Amino acid sequence: IQADLDRAEVIQRALLPQQPPSTPGWCMETLYRPGSSVGGDFYDAVCLRENDLGIVIADAAGHGVAAAMLSVLFKLRFQQISQPGIVLEPAEVLRRLNDGLFDMLSTPGAFVTATYVHIDLGSGQVRIASAGHPPCIVTRDGGDVSMFERTGPALGLVADPEFTEHDFILESGDRLMLYTDGV
């Protein structure tokens, strides 16, 4: 069993970006420390167009193999939605992810929390929608800190959820932090 879990950990790590996409003038750092061999934490960053970056972070409910499998399902759905050249509003991305997951998940307690961020790299304009995920934290260059709470329910729990968005500008020296219990 441990050998299988070790192989599953290698496979799950392969689902994560090996390095962030190149974003001249911007710095992106990631840290992944799972609590066990496999789990439900996931993140990705996608260059959608020349100045448009999409970032997602998610946490599938539970721990272990079931959560890891749910995170794989989430990644597959995310890849179908986040195609280069196509820019969707964060709320729409979460709605589309929810539609696919809600139709597939019929097990009680199977859901995913997620945050999707769209950044216009040219202007610093940021739009965030969050599906039951922990708050995003913005630290301003001057030291002010803001938290952006969830804007809708976790994915897979309800049909046709409503998501709103937070909208703000990141200036030079500001930091945006996204996290889960494992990322």
Image (tube, helix red, strand yellow):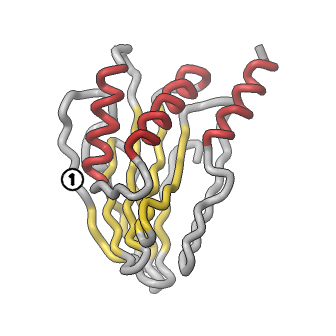
x then y, percent, for residue 21: 58, 62
x then y, percent, for residue 30: 62, 58
Q: Nearer the viewer, residue 68 or 140?
A: 68
> Measuring 58% from the left and 67% from the top, which residue is drawn there?
28
> Measuring 67% from the left and 45% from the top, which residue is drawn there?
33
| Residue 172, above or below 163 | below
Q: Which residue is mark 1?
A: 164
x then y, percent, for residue 45: 51, 55
Q: Is residue 137 visible?
A: no
Residue 125 as seen in the image, left or right of residue 23? left
* Residue placed furthest toward the right: 3
| Residue 77, above or below 56 | above
Q: Is residue 66 visible?
A: yes
Residue 86 quadrant? bottom left
Residue 19 as seen in the image, left or right of residue 106? right
In the structure shown, which secondary structural element does the residue marked by tag 1 occupy?
loop
Mark 1, residues whose alpha carbon is within 10 Å: few (<14), some, or many (≥20)? Answer: some
Residue type highlighted by circle 1: Thr
> Measuring 27% from the left and 56% from the top, which residue is drawn there?
89
x then y, percent, for residue 25: 55, 80
> Measuring 38% from the left and 52% from the top, which residue is drawn there?
116
Residue 145 as seen in the image, left or right of residue 94? right
Residue 92 as seen in the image, left or right of residue 138? left
In the picture, the quarter occupied by the N terminus is: top right
Residue 109 quadrant? top left
